[in-house]
Image (tube, rainbow, N blue to C red):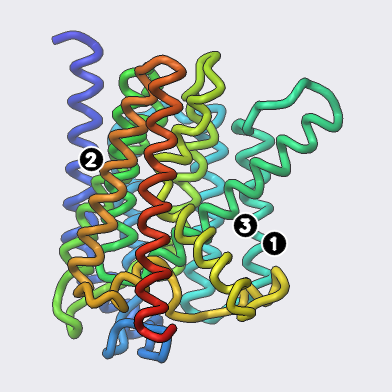
Amino acid sequence: MTPEITSLTKITAASIVSALFVYFTMPFFRGVAIKLRIVDFPGKRKMHRVATPLLGGVAVYCGFAAGILLSRLPVSGSLTAILSASTVILVLGAVDDARGLSARFRIAVQFAAALIVVLFGDRINFLPNGPIGNAVEILVSLIWMVGITNAFNYLDGLDGLAAGSAVINLVAFGAILYRTGQPQLFTVCMVLAGACLGFLPHNFKREKRRVFLGDAGSTFLGFTLASIGLCGYWAKGDPVKVAIPILILGVPIFDMVFTTVMRVAEKKVSTIYGWLKYAGKDHFHHYLVELKLTNNNAVILIYATSVLLGLSAMIASTAGPMTALMSICQGFIIFGIIGVIIVMGKRRNGG
């Protein structure tokens, strides 16, 4: 058996263990959440009708950690920064789930965690080396990290949506990372995908047995995905391929951008702080439900969109500049069509 096959076998085993760990320990985490009253209560902007435990994300993190340990992955460089900073995000989200934290404090800690990855891991490189160029690149990298973290949190509005989307995104990233010989990040993708798969059956259960990711889980997933997109090597001299992480994470990016545009256009928010505090049923998945799709059908449609974008990213990663550019344009067209349908639906419904 070659070393590459042996390594792949270990990673597969670690992913399976991660999934099984999360699946079988979820009743324990659910019980702890209920005992400590770390639950999500129904409300006007919520889609559920029964108070639901929120420690699913902590279980996913523990399963992920167990899988990483089992894989015996050498932890160094960018990976150390990613694992350390994502742990900070997990703890921040767990405290927010349990006690509630201000939006300003959450954003400040998220920027601090993102700074760990940017300074000790990697950052976006697109400007000439120099004080101004470096400062702009760091700022853009921080905005990317914090933006994706919160975008994934906002995506967590229907059963299975955030965790299932994360699996699709992680597999797309993983396929490219494996082909381009980036074993550390590939292992992270596969083990975390396994942890999410172990969580999904509990997220799809009936309301009285259901568990949510909570802010801890959704922000942890978003932050880790943003870190993979930032620290992976996608371009290799082709500037068009820098857009590969944007394609793979197109759904949460579209959700954040489209929701922001609609809120500003409808004068619901006028400041960044107001945007951070605003809570409403006006995200991508909410609009799909308003268009008379069932919750499950809305989730399936978003899954399908993520798969299409992931395939486009894989094509772009192996193709020439022109084909890569066409794949990126295809992604924009997909979301342009979706945006038009949503706006037309809102007008027809009197929104």
The three-letter code of the residue at mark 3 reads: Gln
Image quarter in which the N terminus is found: top left
- For the residues carrying marks 2 and 1, which lies nearer the camera in this image? 1
Disc 3, SS: helix
Task: Please name the residue shown 71% across and 35% down the image.
Answer: 137
Name the residue nearer the viewer: 110 or 281: 281
Task: Please name the residue shown 70% across and 75% down the image.
Answer: 270
Residue 69 placement (x, y as % from top left): 34, 38
Horizontal side, residue 84 vs residue 171: left or right: right
Vertical relation: 89 (above or below) 101: above
Pointer 3 or 2: first along the chain: 2
Q: Quadrant of residue 48?
A: bottom left
Q: Which residue is mark 2?
A: 15
Residue 112 placement (x, y as % from top left): 68, 52
Q: Which residue is mark 1?
A: 108
Horizontal side, residue 94 vs residue 165: left or right: right
Name the residue nearer the viewer: 148 or 264: 264
Q: Quadrant of residue 155?
A: bottom left
Residue 221 seen in the figure? no
The three-letter code of the residue at mark 1 reads: Ala
CA neighbours of label 3 inside 10 A, class few (<14), some (14 to 19), many (20+) = many
Q: Which residue is mark 3?
A: 110
The three-letter code of the residue at mark 2 reads: Ser
Pointer 2 or 1: first along the chain: 2
Task: Please name the residue shown 33% across and 41% down the image.
Answer: 309
CA neighbours of label 2 inside 10 A, class few (<14), some (14 to 19), many (20+) = many
- Alpha carbon of mark 3 to alpha carbon of mark 1: how far? 5 Å
Name the residue nearer the viewer: 97 or 176: 176
In the rendered structure, are the residues bearing label 3 and label 1 in contact, judged by CB atoms less than 8 Å apart? yes
- For the residues carrying marks 3 and 2, which lies nearer the camera in this image? 3
Horizontal side, residue 168 vs residue 324: left or right: left
- Alpha carbon of mark 2 to alpha carbon of mark 1: how far? 33 Å
